[in-house]
Amino acid sequence: MDLTTYKLMHLLGMALVLMSLGARAFFAMQGGDKLSDKARGLGAGTHGVGLLLLLVGGFGMLAKLGISGVPGWIHPKILIWLLLGLAVAVPYRKPELAKPLWFAAPILALIAAYLGLTKLG
Ligand code: HEM
């Protein structure tokens, strides 16, 4: 696969992860919970596929860019990936954190995008 394909996978992954986290956080803010969530499987699947696409796209790009090893600017991106992964458990366990998550998720994505574009660190 070429660089553009990996890049598109990465961007699609980001969209899917943010969409699924946003939907779950929004639902929890309306008082929704695990049991009343009729699209829980769809949401969880979207989140999982999104994380996988982010990872495969990200490491695929590194390989295509000829970057060997894992440079410093990738470390915080891996941490952000982990945080966005764990975040799916937050809204139903701690509904009071659903609103902070609504704002934190896109900010984390913005930081990851900044690191990817500038390669600072
Ligand atoms: C395992 C974690 C990650 C790896 C290995 C990774 C790797 C990369 C690489 C190699 C680039 C390409 C830089 C270039 O084109 O020269 C990139 C760009 C980018 N990354 Fe990541 N990334 C990771 C996590 C994330 C996360 C969690 C997000 C957002 C939720 C994200 C968003 C972006 C964006 C928006 C770009 C810019 C794409 C573009 O050039 O158009 N990344 N990343």
Image (cartoon, rainbow, N blue to C red):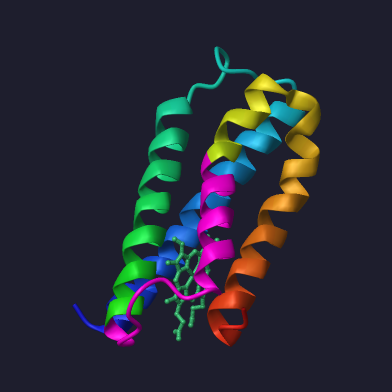
With 2 as the anchor, is 85 left or right in this view? right
Does 59 appear above or below 32? below
Position of the N terminus by quadrant? bottom left
Q: Residue placed at 41% from the left, 60% from the top?
A: 54
Let me know if residue 81 is in the magenta part.
yes
Does 59 appear above or below 114? above
Residue that extends furthest to the top in the rendered view of this protein = 35
Q: Residue placed at 60% from the left, 86% from the top?
A: 118
Does 9 appear above or below 17? below
Position of the C terminus by quadrant? bottom right
Let me know if residue 53 is in the magenta part.
no
Q: Position of residue 37 (x, y in %)?
A: 55, 21
Does 16 appear above or below 41? below
Q: Residue placed at 56% from the left, 17% from the top?
A: 34
Given residues 61 and 47, the one toward you in this image is: 61
Question: Within the image, what quadrant is residue 13 found in?
Answer: bottom left
Q: Which residues are magenta?
A: 64-85
Q: Position of residue 14 (x, y in %)?
A: 50, 60
Q: Residue placed at 28% from the left, 83% from the top?
A: 64
Q: How many marks?
A: 0
With 63 as the anchor, is 80 left or right in this view? right
Q: Position of residue 82 (x, y in %)?
A: 52, 48
Q: Position of residue 114 (x, y in %)?
A: 63, 77
Residue that extends furthest to the left in the rendered view of this protein = 1
With 28 as the anchor, is 86 left or right in this view? left
